[in-house]
Image: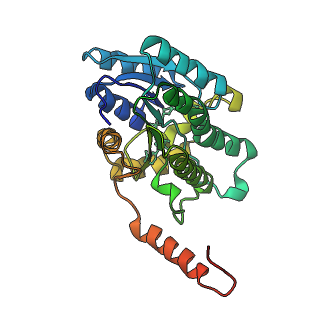
Amino acid sequence: MDISGKNAIVTGAGSGIGLAIATALAEAGANVVMADIQKDAVEQAAHALSGTNKRVMPVRVDVTQEQSVVDALAQCERNFGKLHIACNNAGVPMHGTRMIDVPRDDWEFVIGVNIWGVIHGIRHFVPAMLRHDEEAHIVNTASVAGFQNRRGTDQGPYSMTKYAVLSLSEALEHELQNTKVGVSVLCPGPIATNIARGARNRPDHMGGPQIRATDEATLSERLATTGLDPKKVGERVVDAIRTKTFYAFVSAVPADVIKARHRRIEEALNTLWVTHY
Ligand SMILES: NC(=O)c1ccc[n+]([C@@H]2O[C@H](COP(=O)([O-])OP(=O)(O)OC[C@H]3O[C@@H](n4cnc5c(N)ncnc54)[C@H](O)[C@@H]3O)[C@@H](O)[C@H]2O)c1
């Protein structure tokens, strides 16, 4: 799909991967609504980009809240017109604590942002793209954590949300098969962003911003040493939209772990208990 002149919305555009996606889309000629819960950060980022002649607009959104997503879409359509590209990218981490010890409100936080955020985007951005019957594309940010659980990281809740994003995206691809709306699922490995400090953005209705020094230090260090420059992820997304690539992997992928998991599933299918259809 050609990106130039198209209208896009990117959630989580105030930092890291979302900022890089918004930048790459704007560089490819799109008009971009940069949506984020961090009002100041996204306004500053948009200001810096518009200084280089890009057509971008900052919008405060909380993707856990349906009305907030509806309002962001309305602002996009009012300002730019028809929506052609939607990137459901906002996300938060949850790592370093065994699932039996994760408090209920932490589960709700990670599910609220990482799963409900994408569901709200599917329920509102996709109908907006179907309405005008022009070529359009949706990109959901999952992770390599959506294909396997990495031993020793205690990130079961996060990984679960990313499996959910993968499944939602696969089902959406089926549903949109005979339409002009394409689907990609972005699956990054480690990227050098601020995600380790994800609790800084916790919505007030979910307990408000938090600092989790111990969890943050471990993940920060791993991403700072092994993480790819987010700029590459922006380029990956532009390429995935142009070439209509569904599984958009980028950065280091634990391919052997994913293959071993698939082999284990295949072996489990070859028993007398199972019939195939
Ligand atoms: N960094 C990595 O290594 C990595 C790897 C795989 C997948 N991801 C995914 O990439 C996406 C972006 O993360 P990042 O690494 O750029 O982190 P980041 O913390 O740098 O950026 C995330 C952005 O999302 C925003 N956000 C958080 N909650 C929000 C909400 N309720 N409503 C609106 N915006 C909200 C934050 O304010 C922030 O600007 C996430 O979905 C994350 O799970 C990251």
Which of the 4 image quarters holds residue 271? bottom right
Q: Nearer the viewer, residue 20 or 268?
A: 268
Residue drawn 69% across the image and 32% down it: 206
Q: Nearer the viewer, residue 95 or 22?
A: 22
Residue 225, image x and y in percent? Answer: 34, 51
Q: Is residue 239 left or right of residue 269?
A: left
Q: Nearer the viewer, residue 135 or 51?
A: 135
**How many numbered dots are placed on residues in this image?**
0
For residue 72, above or below residue 264: above
Split into 4 quadrants, where in the image is the N terminus? Answer: top left
Residue 210 visible in the shown view:
no
Residue 197, image x and y in percent? Answer: 51, 38
Residue 76 visible in the shown view:
yes
Q: Nearer the viewer, residue 96 or 56?
A: 56
Residue drawn 59% across the image and 30% down it: 63
Most distant residue in the top direction: 78
Residue drawn 57% across the image and 36% down it: 122
Split into 4 quadrants, where in the image is the C terminus? Answer: bottom right
Residue 159, image x and y in percent? Answer: 56, 54
Q: Is residue 137 left or right of residue 199?
A: left
Most distant residue in the bottom direction: 272
Q: Is residue 38 left or right of residue 221?
A: right
For residue 78, above or below residue 268: above
Residue 41, image x and y in percent? Answer: 44, 22
